[in-house]
Amino acid sequence: MSQQAMLTLENLAQLHRACRQLHSLAYGKVHRRQWRPVLPPARPLCPVQLHPPLWQPDTAPPFRLFTTKEEESDKVKLRPTQPKLQKQEVEIKPRMTVEDLARAMQKDIDHIYEALLNTNVDLDSLEPDSVLDEAWIKDIVKKSGMKYKFAKLKEEKIKENKDAVKRPPADPALLTSRPPVVTILGHVDHGKTTLLDSLRKTQVAATEAGGITQHIGAFLVHLPSGEKITFLDTPGHAAFSAMRARGTHVTDIVILVVAAEDGVMRQTVESIQHAKNAKVPMIVAINKCDKPAADPDRVKKELLAHDVVCEEYGGDVQTVHISALKGDNLIALAEATVALAEVLELKADCTGLVEGTIVESRTDKGKGPVTTAIIQRGTLRKSCILVAGKSWAKVRLMFDENGSPMETASPSMPVEIVGWKEVPSAGEEILEVESEQRAREVIEWRIYAEQQEKVKKDLEVIEAKQKEHQEAYKKEREGLVNLTWKQRRAALFKARKHLMANRPKEKVESDKNMLPIIIKGDVDGSVEAILNILDTYDADEECELDVIQFGVGDIGESDIHLAETFKGIIYGFNVNASKSVQKLAAKKGIQIKMHNIIYRLVEDLQEELSRTLPHAVEEHVLGEAIVLATFDVTVGKNKIPVAGCRVQKGLLDRKMKFKLVRNGEMIWTGPLSSLKHHKDDISVVKTGMDCGLNFEKNIAFEVGDEIVCFGEKEIEQKISWDPGF
């Protein structure tokens, strides 16, 4: 065998061994074996010349490895199991809106609208707060690849009524006599508070803002005969109609004060109506009978028109002619009151739990929430637990109308109570309870009852709006039943075209002055009184007053944000603003104005309204001169008219403005071009001095013309608004 043949055979043998090694390598990987290379032969081999492949070789092995059943089961056990995808469940509740469904599905609102495409639902009429039908909800959930379930209706347990109520009527044998509660009503400035001053020998009217009572005042008056009468002095201004009504609800007798010179006025008529509504007997006190213009008979005749028939005309209403300022005939008025109280046989139960009525409430810096109340049943003592409205109190201190401490307060006695957790509203009923726990139960029940009532009213409003919307929708769709989709679309566009035209445009800045304000008060009566005063504002042509919001309670952050939106001012009456709220207001540049006297608040508001007006220019005369001679001066090619004048009053200052007056008519106004004394240029010419002057404009002078030197000063304008006090 030749040498060449031997080399070829050895190469083939080497190739065979390489193939076996590759096979062992693949098999060893499967069975976790380590490949060991075959040792090369002792003899050197010739390199095998391999031609490059004409195609891409397959990298997969040309054979398949077989495994046993045990190995296959082991692989299955080791393979991770994938959990089955479960559909998301959506809980369906009654009366779900579009927004509620989107929240339950954890989707946005647009997803709900997309799911309702290609359905008979009118998407244009759907709002985020629109209630969806149950069929629509199911369809939306199915299209979203979810499943639904109905929410379990929670059976709300009916809460037990734990409110405090009045006690049953007492045994007549236990009743004792009590002083009468008398309310003084009448028109503003007819002398109600002055009458009380004379009876009490005090000067209450001098301490009131502007001499007008702005709250209900309760006083116990001791008469010389030993009798006691509790008087309520109510405001007479038109803004306090609600306060007068509260006064008549706790009173036994009404004294109607009418000025003999003015007669029956508007608030007099309102007071008569309050007394009739409360079914309270009345005594007419005709005041200011000492004045020359007094006419008591005219007052009695005017009262006939309002069904108040005096005894002189065959009626049952007593009339007493008095002078509250001089104290004339006041004893007769007191005797008439006591006599009427004896006829009424006023009695009360002084034992058991306390019952009463709040006639005035406020917040005192040192005492906290304070109320003035009239006790109607029981005897009030310190440490009594009281409830009124949604507030309760453990009585810490009691004071009379003079600020003196009291230990007890019996029926018909006015008392100032300290110890309230919050300020209750005026007119609320006071009831005593056994313990603090019982007081909290009563307050919780009243808050719960108020919330339920609010929810009920809200549901009624929502149902009414939905019914209105459905009726409008049905009416709009009546003629679209037999139309195609395109025809229906065109008809709806045509029907709504006028609505699109009337769509509100962007707010345009107006040249008209406007002052937006927010009113916050301590109680409803205060807010009502302020709003009634603002109703008298009649200067809209100068500056429009816009009350954007009003309410009861302290000033909060929401009020600051609202005032920032409308660029308004916040007015607070007997309320507070926390430090955080004040810092927020200062940061945003919002004014917060606090007042505890209603008339000061109105005066402040009037000043703010006046600040919105542009400043007026006021002229003040500095000096006057008269033209004695006229001549022309040639400057270049021009002739300039010059006036020879003598200062008759004041001085002429070249820096100021001048007027040329001829025969009482102003000819020209403007600055001077030159001012000379003899041949010298000067700045000021005083009284008695001669001078020559000319204006910047070539104005022809005449002998006898008047030259007036004046200055201008900007002054603030005032709003012409009379609030009525």
Image (spheres, grey):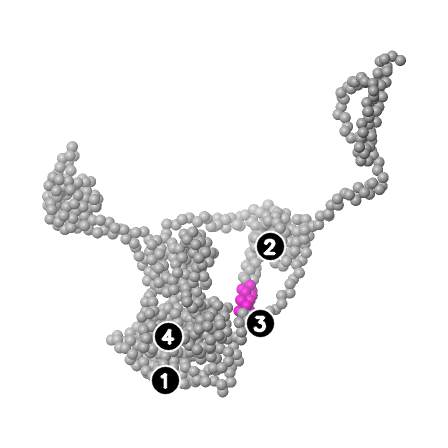
Mark 4, residue position? 402
**Percent coordinates x, y for residue 148 in the rendering:** 68, 54
**Percent coordinates x, y for residue 42 in the rendering:** 83, 20
Residue at position x 79%, y 44% in the image: 77
Between the residue at mark 1 and the residue at mark 2, the CA separation in whole angstroms equals 71 Å
Mark 3, residue position? 161
- State if disc 2 and disc 4 touch (CB < 8 Å): no
First-in-chain label (1 vs 2): 2
Q: Please tell me whether mark 1 or mark 4 is closer to you in this view.
A: 4
Q: Nearer the viewer, residue 98 or 371?
A: 371
Q: Nearer the viewer, residue 694 or 521?
A: 521
Mark 1, residue position? 226
State the mark number for residue 123. none
Residue 308: image quadrant is: bottom left
First-in-chain label (1 vs 4): 1
Name the secondary structure under disc 2: helix
Name the secondary structure under disc 1: loop
The residue range painted magenta reads 442-457
Mark 2, residue position? 100
Q: Please tell me whether mark 1 or mark 3 is closer to you in this view.
A: 1
Residue at position x 15%, y 40% in the image: 681
First-in-chain label (1 vs 3): 3
Q: How many marks?
A: 4
First-in-chain label (3 vs 2): 2
Between the residue at mark 3 and the residue at mark 4, the CA separation in whole angstroms equals 40 Å
First-in-chain label (3 vs 4): 3
Q: Please tell me whether mark 4 or mark 2 is closer to you in this view.
A: 4
First-in-chain label (4 vs 2): 2
Q: Amino acid at mark 1?
A: Gly
Q: Please tell me whether mark 1 or mark 2 is closer to you in this view.
A: 1
Q: Amino acid at mark 3?
A: Asn
Between the residue at mark 1 and the residue at mark 4, the CA separation in whole angstroms equals 19 Å
